[in-house]
Amino acid sequence: MATTPEPLQQVAIALGSNLGASRTTLDEALEALDRNEGVRVIRRSSWYRSAPIGPVQPDYVNGCALLEVSLAPEALLDVLQATENRFGRVRAERWGPRTLDLDLILYGAQRIATERLEVPHPRMAERAFVLLPLAEIAAEWIDPVSGRPVAELAAALSDHGGVERLEEGA
């Protein structure tokens, strides 16, 4: 029995890495996602450097990407986690270092709360390393929780916590 594909949805993901060749890993992860059936990468932000949250570890390289998907939210989560695993993601400790971290930030205008997934990402509005790159590529996207545009959420952050945009190729 064939399944009916989901209607196309625009989604936002956050990407991060602080182990290995992080920029290369993030670029290759987007290429890998784009090769998945039902996933098309539309746009990506610049890369940003940010201090880690949690135990002592190297700084992160972070960014965001917009995807067009025909996958249900949890099916997309499966694709994101499988991609993390292909890039050597090990879940040893909460907020620990990682080769690749892919988070589903926004799924259209939907609010989702399941055992495995919460969208919008529950800490999105307090994280400069998510909001700054997301505002670069989706400034007018309305956060379904606050009803405010992403650019406004980013501007409301009192402190960017040392998050800085990296020069391309640097």
Image (cartoon, helix red, strand yellow):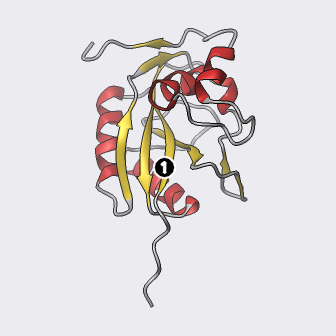
Q: Nearer the viewer, residue 138 or 26?
A: 138
Mark 1 secondary-structure assignment: strand
**Which residue is identified by label 1?**
10
Name of the residue lying farthest toward the bottom: 1
At 71% from the left edge and 39% from the top edge, which residue is drawn? 122
**Image quadrant of residue 169?**
top left
User: Residue 106: horizontal and vertical position, in percent?
Assistant: 58, 44
- Left or right of 6? Residue 127 is right
Q: Which of the 4 image quarters holds residue 154?
A: top right
Residue displayed at 66% across by 53% down? 117
Question: Residue at the left extreme?
Answer: 169
Q: Is residue 31 above or below residue 161?
A: below
Q: x, y (%) of residue 135?
A: 52, 25
Observer able to see residue 55: no
Determine the residue positioned at 72% across, 36% down: 147
**Position in image of residue 129 (x %, y %):** 55, 22
Q: Residue at x 63, y 15 (%)?
A: 155
- Quadrant in the picture for the N terminus: bottom left
